[in-house]
Amino acid sequence: MAVKQADLIALIERGEFTAFEDALRFLLDLKAAGVQIGAASSSKNANIFLRKVSLAKWAGGARGREGSYSFLTSESTLLDMFDANVCGRDFAHGKPAPDIFLAAAADLVLPPEQCVVIEDAQSGVQAAKAGGMACIGVARLDDAALLRSAGADWVVVSLDELPVAALQG
């Protein structure tokens, strides 16, 4: 197990894994619109990955759908974009229990009903709904029907399909 973990970290450090461009644009547009954002992954490697994803290409006055990304610098990483981060924490119950999402909401000082979870897995959608949160299901694996049946409020193939305004107010 230790060898597998070391190999995975080495792959992350070499940049072998990349973030979805639509997800990065959506997150930056949310941030530009003043939306609070939390990170909630049960992966023990999530923070290493988030720290490795550079946002430098969007720095220097780049503009998105919601205005400029003036909050970015050439040193900004994906990890810097979160107002709360519960990644890698141990919880008594994993998904589909809502524990991880409720912890993120608490760290954001928001009631669950004011939170929207973005998920690509059935158990994650179920966890969001069990926590009283809205949920966007991202069907990257031709699994829209599965995410819909799990209770996702919106189902998209790309986050470019969803206007940021749908999540405001």
Image (cartoon, rainbow, N blue to C red):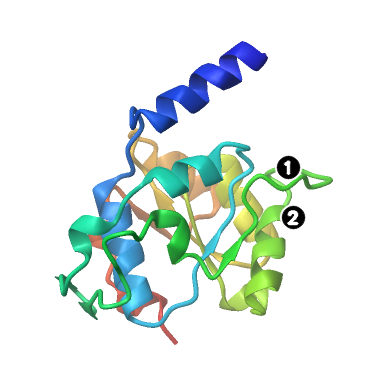
Specify whether 85 is left or right of 31: right
Residue in the foreground of this view, choosing between 66 and 81: 81
Bin the neighbour count of mark 2 within 10 Å (Cα to Cα): few under 14, some 14-19, many 20 and up. Answer: some
Residue 84: where, in percent of width, then height? 59, 66
Residue in the image at 59% along x and 21% along y: 5
Residue 157: where, in percent of width, then height? 29, 47
From this viewpoint, is residue 133 visible? yes
Residue in the image at 65% along x and 52% along y: 127
Res 103 quadrant in image: bottom right
Residue in the foreground of this view, choosing between 69 and 159: 69
The residue type indicated by label 2 comes to Asp
Q: Earlier in the sequence, mark 2 or mark 1?
A: 1
Bin the neighbour count of mark 1 within 10 Å (Cα to Cα): few under 14, some 14-19, many 20 and up. Answer: some
CA distance separating discs 2 and 1:
7 Å
To which residue does mark 2 refer? Answer: 99
The number of discs equals 2
CB within 8 Å, label 2 to label 1: yes
From this viewpoint, is residue 98 visible? no
Specify whether 33 is left or right of 79: left
Element assignment for label 2: helix
Residue 98: where, in percent of width, then height? 71, 55
